[in-house]
Image (cartoon, rainbow, N blue to C red):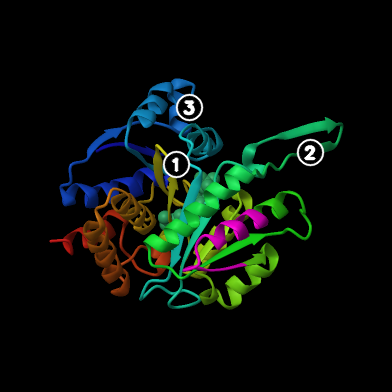
Amino acid sequence: MRITVIPGDGIGREVMDAAMLILEKLNLPFEFVWMEAGDEALKKYGKALPDETLEECLKSDAVLFGAAGETAADVIVRLRFELETFANVRPAKSYRGVNCLYEGVDIVIVRENTECLYKGLEFEVAEGVTQGIRVITEKGSRRIAEFAFELARREGRKKVTALHKANVMKKTCGLFRDVCRKVAEGYPDIEFNDYYIDAACMYLVMDPKRFDVILTTNMFGDIVSDLAAGLVGGLGLAPSANIGEKHAIFEPVHGSAPDIAGKGIANPSAMILTACMMLRHFGYIDEANRVEKALEDVLAEGKTTPDLGGNLRTMEMAEEVARRLN
Ligand code: ATP
């Protein structure tokens, strides 16, 4: 298995070292190829996503990505498009010992990754007048809806909830909602419902346990996944995967966090959980469960970085996890 490793910028480098400590320890048949991208790459090579990095990503079985700073749109957003990773999977789970709003939350957000307002079709149509185009297609909606239901089946989850705003965006969200409802008919074993996105945000904060798998469009998915991360202890704990037919990119939800970069105090949990998602993607289920359990124990014992109230440094927390894998 050939994995392109892109630490990127800021805390991306620090949390990547932490996750690699764990992955190396598992001794799996992975070949790690380290490549550059991000703000530093732009300064060095004049390109935030150098051609060799993109070529390596296209050749490899998966990309493990840390974070990009100012150049995120040119790096990770571009990579998601180039590698056609149409599904962005963002779990939000509350772990024992972590000070979060609710215990027992276990939600997976499935976000469409290639359409919607994030396509970047923005124009200045006249002086002081701008316009953005929202693209939602039947094909794209069906592909992501089927992905969400398949994920629910595979993970033994019970319910899929589609989020949209079809009462206002009648064409785009209307199409998305109708396709989701249609796809749901093919999965009678999985419960299905849909909510307006605004109401869903309120339900998420007041009663998150009514959600299991959330299925939504690109921009709504981006926003609700940060909201969901906030429910369970913050960005330091939020992993993600971008999955396509041929390629996969695994990255924490957080960015380069310039305010804490270089201090060695970034929480490595999101990146370690991201590595677990990669392990599961390749069928290393036991290994992923072992790492997640070790991390859970470390969190429960309060052996954490300062964002979660502990006093460990990034690598010290990773070493605690690694030690429990023995
Ligand atoms: P970028 O522009 O690269 O997205 P950002 O600072 O705008 O960076 P994030 O990196 O996503 O956005 O982080 C927002 C804030 O959350 C950070 O400033 C930091 O304080 C906190 N944060 C994010 N990730 C972590 C982490 N792994 N450990 C601790 N705190 C974190």
Label 1's element?
A: loop
Q: Is residue 57 above or below residue 147?
A: above
Give the Cα distance between marks 3 and 1.
27 Å
Q: Nearer the viewer, residue 173 or 20?
A: 173
Residue visible at 33% across and 66% down in the picture:
304
Q: Amino acid at mark 2?
A: Gln
Q: Which residue is mark 2?
A: 131
Q: Position of residue 134 (x, y in %)?
A: 71, 43
Q: How many marks?
A: 3
Image check: 116 left or right of 248? right
From the image, state whether disc 2 or disc 3 is nearer to you: 2
Task: For ligand 1, tell me if the residue under mark 3 lies within 8 Å.
Answer: no
Crowd around label 2: few <14 · some 14–19 · many ≥20 (10 Å): few
Q: Nearer the viewer, residue 252 or 221?
A: 221
Could you tell me if residue 188 is visible in this image? yes
Q: Mark 3 — residue?
A: 42
In what element is the residue under mark 2? strand
